[in-house]
Image (cartoon, grey):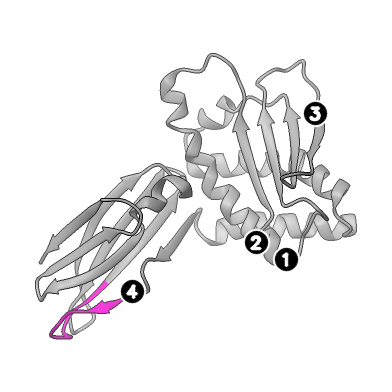
Amino acid sequence: MLNIHFMDWGKNRPKKHYKRLHEMRIFELIFSSKITELGVGLSDFKSISVFCLANSIKTVSFDEDIAIGDIKILVPYDYMSFLKLGSTEDKFQEFSELVRRYIVPAIKKYSKLPTSIIESYVEEALNQIVKQNFEAVFIVDKTPRKSPSRKKMAILKGIHRSEGFHLRCEVYNEKGLRIIDELLVEEVGNEIVYARFLGTLKWEKENLILVKSKSSSWKAELCL
C-alpha cells in the first residue's frame, strides 16, 4: 500500500500537543488505502513522509530514501494549524488542501500516470473519506459469534475516528435486537497503538463474554 503520513517537526511544543497528533491519521489511512486500490504507484517508493517544519521561511524540498522506499518532503506548514480546527469536517478540508499542495506534486513527480488521471484519483480518494463518514469501522476476530444456547450473538467492533479509537462489543438477541453496546477500550487513533487490544472474543458462559488481546495481557469481561 502507498502510505502517506504527515508529521509535526515543529519545535518547543507543549506536552498535550503530542497526545493529539493522531487526529489526522484516519484521513491518511483511508486516503492511502483508496489511492492504492485505484492503482497509483511510485515506482520504487511505497511511502511519502511529510515533515511539517512550522517555519514560514522554509521552502518545499524533496529527499529520497531508496533503502526504505520513502519519499521525504520538508514543508513550511505548521501542524498546529490543523489541530486548532474545531470540527472533523474542517480538519478534513484542511487535510484535503495539504494533500493537493504537497502529496499531489510528489505523485506527479514519481508516478508514470498522466496528470489528469492522478488528479482525478486523488479527488476520488479524498471523497472516499467523506463516503466513510470520516471513520473506519471494522469487525474484530471474525465475529459475530453465537452464545452456547445460540440465542444470542456477539460482535466485536473497532471504530477509528479523528477523535480516537473505540473497541466495542455488541450483543443481539434471537430477534436480532441489540441488547448490549459496551465500550471496552478508548485509545488514541493510531493503528499501531490500538493494535494491542485487537484479539479474540469467546463466550465463557451464556451470560459471560471474555475479550482478550493476542499480543498483550489486556482482557475484559462482559457480564450480560
Residue type of the residue flagged with mark 4 = Thr
State the residue at coordinates (41%, 52%). 195
Badge 3 density bin: few <14, some 14–19, many ≥20, Cα 10 Å: few
Badge 1 density bin: few <14, some 14–19, many ≥20, Cα 10 Å: few
Instruction: Tell me whether the residue at label 2 lies in contact with that at label 1, contact meaning CB atoms closer than 8 angstroms.
Output: yes
Residue type of the residue flagged with mark 1 = Leu
Q: Going from the N terminus, do you reach mark 3 or mark 4 first?
A: 3
Disc 1 designates what residue? Answer: 38
Find the distance from the CA under tag 4 to the CA under tag 2: 25 Å
Find the distance from the CA under tag 2 to the CA under tag 1: 6 Å
Identify the element where label 4 is drawn: loop
Instruction: Tell me whether the residue at label 1 lies in contact with that at label 3, contact meaning CB atoms closer than 8 angstroms.
Output: no
Residue type of the residue flagged with mark 3 = Val
Q: Going from the N terminus, do you reach mark 3 or mark 2 first?
A: 2
Instruction: Tell me whether the residue at label 4 lies in contact with that at label 2, contact meaning CB atoms closer than 8 angstroms.
Output: no
Find the distance from the CA under tag 1 to the CA under tag 3: 27 Å
Q: Going from the N terminus, do you reach mark 4 or mark 1 first?
A: 1
Identify the element where label 1 is drawn: loop
Q: Quadrant of the C terminus?
A: bottom left
Q: Nearer the viewer, residue 124 or 34?
A: 34
4 vs 1, front mark: 4
Q: Which residues are magenta?
A: 144-154
Above-or-below relation of 57 to 109: above
Q: How far across and how far down the image is residue 183, in percent?
A: 25, 54
Q: Going from the N terminus, do you reach mark 1 or mark 3 first?
A: 1
Disc 3 designates what residue? Answer: 60
> Going by the image, does 161 lie left or right of 116?
left
Disc 2 designates what residue? Answer: 34
Q: Main secondary structure of the magenta part?
A: loop
Q: Is residue 80 magenta?
A: no
